[in-house]
Image (cartoon, helix red, strand yellow):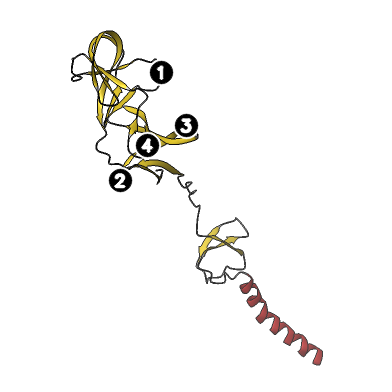
Amino acid sequence: MKILRRLMELVIVLSVCLPVIAKNADAHGGDASLVHACVGTVGGIVRVVGPTENCTSSETARHWSIGGLTEPQSPRPAPVLAVYDANNVRIGDVVGVAINNEGPSRPVVWMITDRVAFLLVVTRDKFIGNQTEAFFESSNCSGAAYLSDSGEALPAVAVIGMIAYVADGPSTDIFFGSRLSNDGSCQLFGGPLNMLPAIQVDLSVYSPPFAIGVRRAR
């Protein structure tokens, strides 16, 4: 009788404890940072449940992050050197340096207007082009301007004072009456030449001194 009584007590204990063990094995733990689901062991049916809900004895608990896929981060744009005037107005991006006998000394900037794009060397207080004079049909350096056709790929540019004469168009034969040097002097000059028509770009909108700064590329 004692043995039978002990067996009956063991059966009662097991009948109470086993459901608890199964239930705890399928518990989700309440972590709200995860997606919780119960997957059926037969048929594989998935049932999404709350963080504190339990799966049945015929289901297996599964969890995964609710963060989802993250978008790849774009690389941070690299800084770009540019030349600015005294009022912090950007003149143009630095694309190279002019070299003298002592090495690199002056930045070369890429100037862009609504009509032409061209390169200029910039010192602390002035601009320098790749030509030193402009030509005119008139005898007093007024009217339409022209530049020498050097055959180079880069646009011809002559800076005289704070005006840049920039080649804009194919070369043509013109009979000239005067020429304007980069020191501002106008000289009589007669004869036909094959030249490039030029437009004028006003550089007086920039106030010296000029200096290199850093901008963030877009």
Could you give the CA–CA distance between mark 1 and mark 3, rounded to whole angstroms?
19 Å
Question: The residue under label 4 is which amino acid type?
Answer: Thr
Foreground disc of the pair 4, 1: 4
- Secondary element at tag 3: strand
Q: Residue at x 27, y 34 (%)?
A: 203
> Which badge, 2 or 3, comes first in the chain's sequence?
2
What crowding class fits label 4: few (fewer than 14 Cα within 10 Å), some (14-19), or many (20 or more)?
Answer: some
**Residue 24 visible in the picture:** yes
**Residue 99 disc label:** 3
Q: Are there few (<14), some (14-19), or many (20+) residues within 10 Å of tag 2?
A: few
Spot occupied by residue 67 in the image (x, y as percentages of width and height) = 50, 58
Badge 1 is on which residue?
Answer: 152
Earlier in the chain: of badge 3 and badge 4, it is: 3
Compared to residue 101, the image places residue 139 above or below, namely: above
Please report contact status of discs 4 and 1: CB closer than 8 Å, yes or no.
no
Label placed on residue 123 = 4
Q: Amino acid at mark 2?
A: Ala
Give whichever of discs 4 and 1 has the lower sequence position. 4
Q: Which mark is residue 86?
A: 2
N-terminal of the two: label 1 or label 2?
A: 2
Which sits in the foreground, 81 or 56? 81
Task: Using the rendered view, name the quadrant where residue 5 is placed.
Answer: bottom right
What is the distance, in whole Å, between disc 2 and disc 4 at their CAs?
13 Å
Q: Are marks 1 and 2 in contact (CB under 8 Å)?
A: no
User: Distance of mark 1 from mark 2, alpha carbons?
Assistant: 33 Å
Dot 3, how many residues are within 10 Å of its Cα: few (below 14), some (14-19), or many (20+)? few
For the point 31% across and 46% down, which residue is it? 88
Q: Look at label 3 and name its amino acid.
A: Ile
